[in-house]
Image: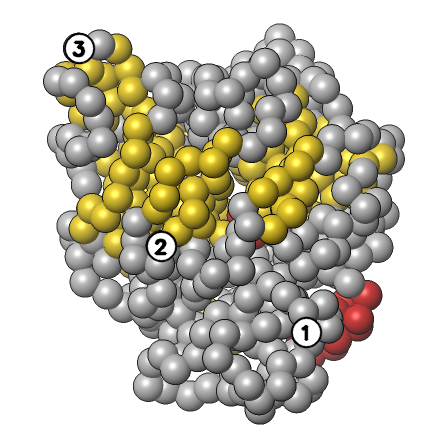
């Protein structure tokens, strides 16, 4: 899922192609067996995944849920009870050559969601999407977010209990942050997770992880255009993560830069990705990647709007990371081009081919095209993840008229049934908001599904905008089960 060393790529060829050896740090403390810990970074530099408490000798082929006596060819997950790390009967792990934002996580069943933690961002700090990832080596999930109008992106160190410390601001890439989405992945091969955003004001920004929640700018070769959203993907198959940046209404459109494996970037002269934006009503604030057509290379999906209509824009990769063929997957009404859009990639009908959630609408993939599946609601924001441990990807949506909603998948991808899990609706007043709240949910922004407290159940981290007597206020919230 992130910049993969060559031994890692060779290990994953053949039958284990989609059973990713987590040589990277996976963003969620995914639902593995209850006596196993989730892989951590390669702290000792031996090229093997480190598992806290695992003294049996980790190997490059350790998988979440496997026992401490793994061998390089052991791809069999542990058996129940407590084994909730399967999606469609296969060990759920990040897909090779993609960023963490593209991963639809597994999870065990849990009770209702409860408010766990929140903090106020700067006023009008919306248009941002939080991502949960292990950014240091303490075993606790952390948060990365790029709040609009803050001086720069933030990281929050997790405590492992569903609460987080105060914000650490990353080195500034411009005069101030413009918000929108980003991604997490190891682009320089040092075993630590690095960061990237497509910033609406500051342009393309990447940060190299120096450890202990310290980051440095890695922007050499990146474009300075205003952009909306960013994603990681190894587009040319060289084992290094490349970066894709989304179009906004002011720019010339999508931008691709190939990673050199050293934290620097090269313009490959990409073709086939249209120059959306340039004065038209287009934006793409969330970028995901997957091998959508099964040809062995990684393709791109930009979730956004075209002329006010919600869309997932698919770009099929020719294999060299230079030439692409586009396909628009419509998702209905979108609204203002300044509003965020979020979608997800995952196999919702278990046919072995990735599908799309474009906001609250499901599109079933055939490898070369997508057909309408279930419509949960008209939300512009949607994420996939297994909420009840049955091995099927469920859907969570975020909308100003209803707040957060959860829909359980019957396994066909054609039927998603809403379930009451105590999620906050549009009347919820965030405790972190200061002053008198006049509009509790003025605007919903991005969110992530991940296990933030280590109980193998998926939690939610979200950004919301509320209106108070003093103006707008953006809130970063955590909801645990």
Find residue 196 and report its horizontal and vertical position in percent: 62, 37
Of tags 2 and 3, the one toward the viewer is 2
Between residue 49 and residue 167, name the one nearer to us: 167
Q: Residue at x 58, y 43 (%)?
A: 214
Q: Which mark is residue 48?
A: 1
Point out the tag, 1 or 3, that comes first from the N-terminus. 1
Q: Is residue 256 visible?
A: no
Left-right relation of 470 to 296: left
Q: Residue at x 39, y 51 (%)?
A: 158
Question: Residue 461 falls in which quadrant of the image?
Answer: top left
The residue under label 2 is: 159
What distance separates the C-alpha of mark 1 from that of mark 3?
54 Å
Left-right relation of 400 to 198: left
Q: Is residue 211 above or below residue 178?
A: below
The residue under label 3 is: 469
Quadrant where the N terminus is found in the figure: bottom right
Between residue 324 and residue 64, name the one nearer to us: 64
Element assignment for label 3: loop
Callouts 1 and 2 close, C-beta under 8 Å: no
Element assignment for label 2: loop
Of tags 1 and 3, the one toward the viewer is 1
């Amino acid at each position: 899922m992130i910049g993969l060393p060559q031994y890692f790529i060779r290990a994953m060829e053949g039958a284990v192609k989609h059973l990713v050896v987590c040589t990277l740090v996976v963003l969620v403390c995914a639902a593995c067996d209850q006596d196993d810990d989730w892989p951590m970074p390669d702290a000792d530099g031996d090229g093997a995944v480190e598992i806290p408490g695992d003294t049996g000798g980790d190997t490059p082929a350790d998988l979440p849920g496997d026992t401490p006596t793994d061998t390089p060819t052991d791809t069999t997950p542990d058996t129940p009870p407590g084994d909730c790390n399967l999606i469609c009967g296969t060990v759920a792990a990040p897909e090779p050559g993609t960023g963490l934002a593209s991963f639809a996580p597994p999870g065990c069943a849990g009770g209702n969601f409860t408010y766990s933690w929140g903090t106020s961002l700067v006023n009008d700090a919306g248009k941002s999407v939080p991502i949960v990832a292990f950014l240091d080596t303490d075993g606790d999930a952390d948060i990365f977010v790029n709040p609009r109008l803050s001086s720069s992106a933030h990281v929050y160190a997790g405590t492992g209990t569903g609460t987080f410390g105060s914000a650490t601001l990353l080195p500034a890439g411009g005069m101030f942050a413009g918000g929108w989405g980003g991604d997490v992945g190891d682009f320089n091969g040092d075993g630590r997770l690095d960061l990237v955003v497509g910033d609406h004001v500051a342009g393309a920004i990447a940060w190299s992880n120096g450890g202990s929640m310290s980051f440095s700018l890695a922007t050499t070769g990146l474009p300075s255009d205003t952009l909306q959203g960013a994603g990681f993907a190894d587009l040319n198959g060289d084992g290094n993560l490349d970066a894709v940046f989304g179009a906004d209404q002011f720019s010339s459109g999508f931008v691709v830069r190939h990673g050199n494996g050293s934290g620097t970037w090269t313009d490959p002269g990409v073709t086939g990705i249209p120059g959306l934006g340039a004065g038209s009503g287009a934006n793409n604030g969330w970028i995901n990647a997957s091998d959508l057509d099964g040809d062995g290379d990684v393709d791109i999906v930009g979730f956004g709007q075209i002329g006010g209509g919600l869309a997932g824009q698919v770009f099929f990769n020719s294999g060299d990371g230079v030439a692409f063929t586009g396909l628009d997957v419509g998702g209905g009404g979108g609204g203002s081009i300044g509003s965020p859009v979020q979608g997800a990639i995952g196999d919702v009908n278990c046919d072995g081919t990735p599908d799309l959630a474009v906001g609250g609408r499901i599109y079933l993939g055939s490898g070369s095209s997508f057909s309408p599946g279930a419509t949960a609601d008209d939300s512009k924001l949607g994420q996939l993840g297994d909420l009840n441990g049955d091995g099927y990807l469920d859907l969570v949506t975020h909308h100003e008229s209803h707040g957060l909603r959860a829909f359980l998948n019957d396994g066909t991808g054609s039927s998603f049934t809403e379930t009451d899990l105590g999620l906050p609706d549009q009347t919820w007043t965030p405790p972190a908001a200061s002053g008198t709240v006049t509009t509790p949910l003025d605007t919903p922004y991005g969110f992530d599904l991940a296990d933030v407290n280590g109980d193998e159940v998926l939690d939610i981290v979200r950004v919301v905008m509320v209106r108070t007597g003093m103006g707008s206020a953006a809130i970063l919230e955590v909801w645990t089960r």
